[in-house]
Image (tube, rainbow, N blue to C red):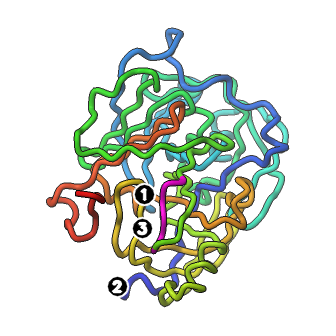
Amino acid sequence: MKRHLFSLLTVALGAVAALTPAAAQQRGATGSLIERTGGTPSTAETIGYSPDAWQRMTVAVNVGGRGPYRFIVDTGAERTVISSELAERLGLARGGDVTLASVSTVSRVPSVMIDNLEVGRRTLSNIQAPALLERHIGAQGMLGVDSLRSQRVIFDFANRELILTASHIEDDRRNPDEIVVRGRTRLGRLIITNASVDGQRITVIVDTGSQVTVGNDALRRQLARRGRLGETRILALTGVTGDLVNADYTVANRVRIGGLHVNDMPIAFSDVALFHLLGLRERPAILLGMDMMRLFDRVSIDFANSRVRLLPPHSSRESGSRMAALGR
């Protein structure tokens, strides 16, 4: 194990910027991202991105025709979020308080109304967005799954690009080396069940808003019972409302997702709120964070078709001993 893994760290966990089921019945965004001229975009659109301080992916977004502003692409967040500082600067109307679950707490937070939000050629209209402090978000906002549910989102780490395309359009960037993993959706999130950690079957929540991969206590207990839990140290996780929770940080020998496995993968164990919201408190599960996704050359997340495509790295980016395709 590398020594730097076992210091007291504070990392960002955006995944639990999610409205509780009761709050989800309140007004949200109207539809998913659509072409500003009307209808679903007919072509793929490549958008440049830049990593934030925690290596999460941020893109340029216009709000009400003004911008650009940096928003994190967060596939673990149910709703799009805006910073309260930006909302005040833009003079956005209040939308009433909403219930929001963060790392360790469920609380009432203010929201604002966004008439339209633009990402490249696409726009999202009539959004009731929770308004949170920028220093807790780590950016000026977050794009949640409410804006992505009809899209295929391709994170091309090798070329530092984000590609958006409608899910019904064939992906012309497919690579024969890609591994396809089918899943399902729950409360808008993409869930994968064909996965394991050190031989223990798990449920995986694909979460681009979290810096680290997080496992729940049910997984921790199972690994400990089997004698497969390594040495742990304390890692502090911070949520979008500024709350902190300590996690047990360790390294798993092998994580398998579909037909791929990754060796020596760090996991932080904590029962964060998203596990509870998705009914996974008693079932071994992980939030698949950006630390693992960045090991791939490309990750394609198709919400409408409940499918993830993973392109293993070339030797120039990642040692072949760290990752391998099963059955090859």
Residue type at tag 2: Lys
Q: Which residue is mark 1?
A: 257
Image coords of residue 264 (percent x, y): 36, 76
- Which residue is tagged 2? 2
Marks 3 and 2 sit apart, C-alpha to C-alpha, by 18 Å
Work out which quarter of the rendered image holds the C terminus and state it.
bottom left
Compared with 290, 245 (above or below) is below
- Mark 3: few, some, or many residues within 10 Å (few <14, many ≥20)? many
Residue at the (46%, 26%) spot, across then down: 167
Q: Dot 3 corresponds to which residue?
A: 255
- Give yes or no for residue 257 being in the magenta stretch: no
The image quadrant that residue 102 belongs to is bottom right
Given the image, on which type of amino acid does mark 1 rest? Ile
Give how far apart the Cα atoms at labels 2 and 1 are: 23 Å
Frontmost residue, 217 versus 292 = 217
Q: Nearer the viewer, residue 207 or 255?
A: 255
Q: Residue at x 58, y 50 (%)?
A: 76
Magenta segment: 193-198
Relative placement, left or right, of 157 versus 221 is left
The residue carrying pointer 2 sits among few (fewer than 14), some (14 to 19) or many (20 or more) residues within 10 Å by Cα, namely few
Q: Residue furthest front?
A: 327
Left or right: where does residue 27 sit relative to residue 145? right
Q: Looking at the image, which residue is at 67% across and 65% down?
A: 283
Q: Is residue 129 left or right of residue 67?
A: right
